[in-house]
Amino acid sequence: MHILADGSTAASSTSSFWTFAPIILMFLVLYFLLIRPQQKRQKTRNGMLNTLKKGDKVVTIGGMHGSILEIDDENNTILLRVNDTTKLTFDRSAINAISQSTPVSEKN
């Protein structure tokens, strides 16, 4: 009987590994298919939001097109000029894309 008991404990430890192997495999697949690409997109978006400057033509997440008149880093807001008479204030996070960037002027 002792021999049978010793053999069953070794078999149960390898069996428990194979029980959790599919769960570990599913986590790894989800990480590489969902979580990692989302982190890369978020890093790219944060980089784009940090490079915004006065004069850039941007599109908001609501589809509003305008050019940046003023950037308030303290309140994290942006003043957009939509047309000659309309100026709107948006959160910096409301910017979806830069449609045209202004060239950086070099001082000589």
Image (cartoon, rainbow, N blue to C red):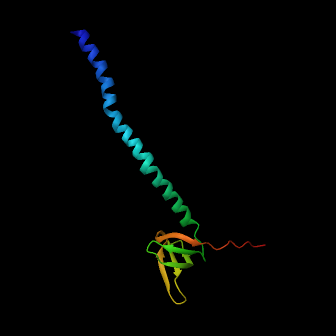
In the figure, is residue 105 to the left or right of 57?
A: right
Q: Residue furthest left?
A: 1
Residue drawn at point x = 52 percent, y = 69 percent: 97
Q: Quadrant of residue 51?
A: bottom right
Residue drawn at point x = 28 percent, y = 23 percent: 12
Whole-percent x, y for residue 39 in the image: 47, 54
Whole-percent x, y for residue 60 in the image: 48, 73
Q: Quadrant of the N terminus?
A: top left
Up-down: is 21 above or below 78? above
**Foreground residue, 88 or 59?**
59
Up-down: is 56 above or below 35? below
Whole-percent x, y for residue 8 in the image: 26, 17
**Foreground residue, 51 or 27?**
27
Q: Quadrant of the C terminus?
A: bottom right
Residue drawn at point x = 64 percent, y = 74 percent: 102
Q: Residue furthest right?
A: 108
Q: State the count of labels.
A: 0
Residue drawn at point x = 23 percent, y = 10 percent: 2
In the figure, is residue 101 to the left or right of 27?
A: right
Up-down: is 54 above or below 5? below
In the figure, is residue 56 to the left or right of 90?
A: right
Whole-percent x, y for residue 48 in the image: 55, 64
